[in-house]
Image (cartoon, grey):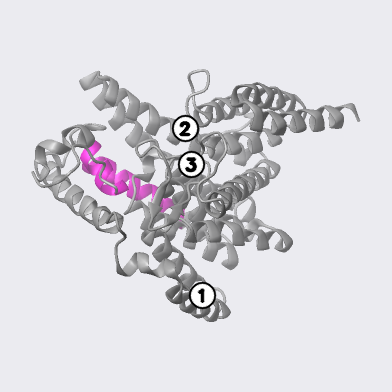
Amino acid sequence: MLRKRIDKLLIFLSIILFFVDLRFFLISITLLFLFYLFTCPENCLIIILLLTFTESSPIFGVTFTKIGLLFLLALFLFNIKKFHYDPIFIPMIIISLLFLGWYFYLLDHTTLRWTVTIIGNIVFAFLLIELSYQDKKIFDTIIKGLFLAILLNSALAIYQFVSNGRTIHYFGINNDKGGFERWNNFIRVSGFFQNTNLLLSFLLPSSMIIIPFLKKRWGYLLILPFLSILFTFSRGGWIAIFVSFLLLSIFYNKKIFLVMIIITAIFLLAPFSQRFFKSDKVKSVYYSDIQRIESVKVAKRFISHNILIGIGPGKFYERFRKYASQKFLWNRFYPHNTFVSILCDIGIGGLISILSILIFSFFHTLKLEKQKVVFLSASLISLFLLSNLYDLHWEPQFWIIVAISVSARFYYGKKLKV
């Protein structure tokens, strides 16, 4: 009885402090984490995933995402009883070693920053897989925590859209632009992330992957993330949704195809569809296209000279101006493609490794029952499509999909015994 009262008190206190001051919220949520660590360890994962998918400016010198990783490591150390080996760990280790090799060769701050980021995300996936192997309750709690993170990001995104740019504690504000991105008079929502692309790459694959693990009464709430994706005004996101639902209609339920036709017809009649067919006053669509075209041209020059080992983590961004067209307006730019970025950073070994991770993840899903195979495969395909538009290997939303794809077969596989 006392435990329940303490639990409710700390939850209530954390919610109140979140709206008051993020520093006090962080103290309160840390106390809640420690309480769960010694009373109900699996509930720690809900806190961890909420922090991981809530991007914030540094508080006490660190971001929520890094704090979430520290909490995850603590949970792992307190609960590890047995280890699971999986072939997917090999390409994960190779990527880590290639980044470390570049760091020890260059010994500069930029390389250190990107090396820590990628290894942190790989460790994040590894720890989730190993913790899932310990107990089915842990895997189910990961699904619950991810579901809650999806709903909270969706709720804030919809609020940002309806209120025309209001938010909480500057969440969703694009640091490079000093405000929300816009298309015509519409806000491009970001939820708790710092730009629209990060929100989209979180909501779509994550929503698809949790569907077969949710009870039916909760599944209807997933209309919220799909509305939020619509409000991102991302052409890549809309295409990824279309492809994902097309796969579901072919391999799972033919009725979904009829729903797709109705939604597509409504979409084409709505003003949103103009994002595909014409630019806005500030030519955001035009600039988005030429940015990506120019980044591919620059990447080809880098790759042609350094395909084996790459040019070093983060060096594409630093050296972009030197190889870009003189007419191009931006001095620095990212590849906006996971596979091109990896190839430029650490060479062909890195590219083979990241593709191997996706392939291993897909083969893991084939060991599940049909419904789960279809939804997890659709999630991975949407992740692959989005990875061709954004540098997702730097983000935990890429690695959470990998972790769940691998871990699901521990308890929902056809023949595997744990």
Q: Examine the rendering and report whether any part of residue 277 can be seen.
A: yes
User: Is residue 321 part of the magenta span, yes or no?
Assistant: no
Report the magenta stretch's main SS: helix
Q: Position of residue 87 (x, y in %)?
A: 43, 44
**Compared to 129, does 370 lie above or below?**
below
Q: Which residues are magenta?
A: 337-362
Q: Position of residue 264 (x, y in %)?
A: 46, 75
Q: Nearer the viewer, mark 2 or mark 3?
A: 3
- Pick whichever of labels 1 and 3 is earlier in the sequence: 3
Q: Residue at x 25, y 45 (%)?
A: 335
- Pick whichever of labels 1 and 2 is earlier in the sequence: 2
Q: Which mark is residue 123?
A: 2
Q: Which mark is residue 263?
A: 1
Quadrant position of residue 10: top right
What's under tag 3, amino acid-wise? Answer: Gly
Q: Residue at x 14, y 50 (%)?
A: 297
Q: Quadrant of the C terminus?
A: top right
Q: CA separation, marks 1 and 2?
A: 39 Å
Q: Is residue 85 left or right of residue 275?
A: right
* Count of marks, rendered view: 3
Q: Examine the rendering and report whether any part of residue 346 can be seen.
A: no
Q: Nearer the viewer, mark 1 or mark 2?
A: 1
Between 127 and 268, the residue placed more toward the observer is 268
Between 39 and 229, the residue placed more toward the observer is 229
Q: Is residue 212 left or right of residue 257?
A: right
Q: Does dot 2 land on a helix, a strand or a loop?
A: helix
What's under tag 1, amino acid-wise? Answer: Ile
Between 47 and 351, the residue placed more toward the observer is 47
Question: Residue beneath label 3, please?
Answer: 172
